[in-house]
Image (cartoon, rainbow, N blue to C red):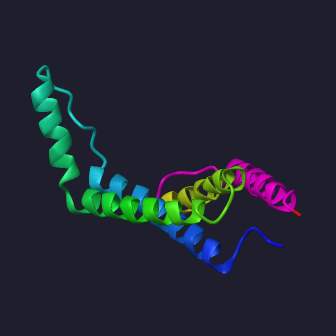
Amino acid sequence: MSVFSPMAIITLLGFLLCSSFGQICMKLGMKGEEIPIEKSPFKTIINIILVMLRPYTLTGFVLYVIGALSWLMFLSRVPLNVAYPMISIGYVAIMVLSGVILKEKINWRYASAALVCIAVGVCFIGYSLH
């Protein structure tokens, strides 16, 4: 019997999509800027709140909340020792999305090797369930 029911796979995909695109949206919300750190902690907190209120950043937070709900649904269907390694699939998605959407410079030769290692590791965990 497989640990991954159709609903478990759907909730995992929901988590991965929401968390990956949430990261991309938050990065877009930063607009390539650093959050200024002021002498006054109050002013620094205001700077953080202003960044949090940007549309892309807010969208990222909303996607994170939806992703967290999907993650809870996934955890209710799959043992934690199986579920947690699935987070690493998000690393693959973030790497690809950051290169495609954010146009970040990626050395694909090394990145591809690392991503294959992650994928193989997740597959081993999946196969160990049988």
Q: Is residue 41 visible?
A: yes
Q: Residue at (75%, 58%) from the top-left corner?
A: 119
Q: Is residue 102 visible?
A: no
Placement of 9 over or under 79, stated as above or below: below
Range of magenta residues: 102-129
Left-right relation of 86 to 46: right
Left-right relation of 66 to 33: right
Q: Nearer the viewer, residue 110 or 23?
A: 23
Left-right relation of 17 to 127: left
Left-right relation of 65 to 52: right
Residue 21 location in percent, x, y? 44, 64
Q: Nearer the viewer, residue 3 or 123?
A: 3
Residue 20 location in percent, x, y? 49, 60
Residue 65 counted in the magenta span:
no
Identify the image quadrant of residue 128: bottom right
Identify the image quadrant of residue 22: bottom left
Q: Residue at (32%, 63%) from the top-left corner?
A: 62
Residue 3 location in percent, x, y? 75, 67
Quarter of the image that includes the C terminus: bottom right
Placement of 45 over or under 69, stated as above or below: above
Residue farthest front in this picture? 76
Q: How many discs appear? A: 0
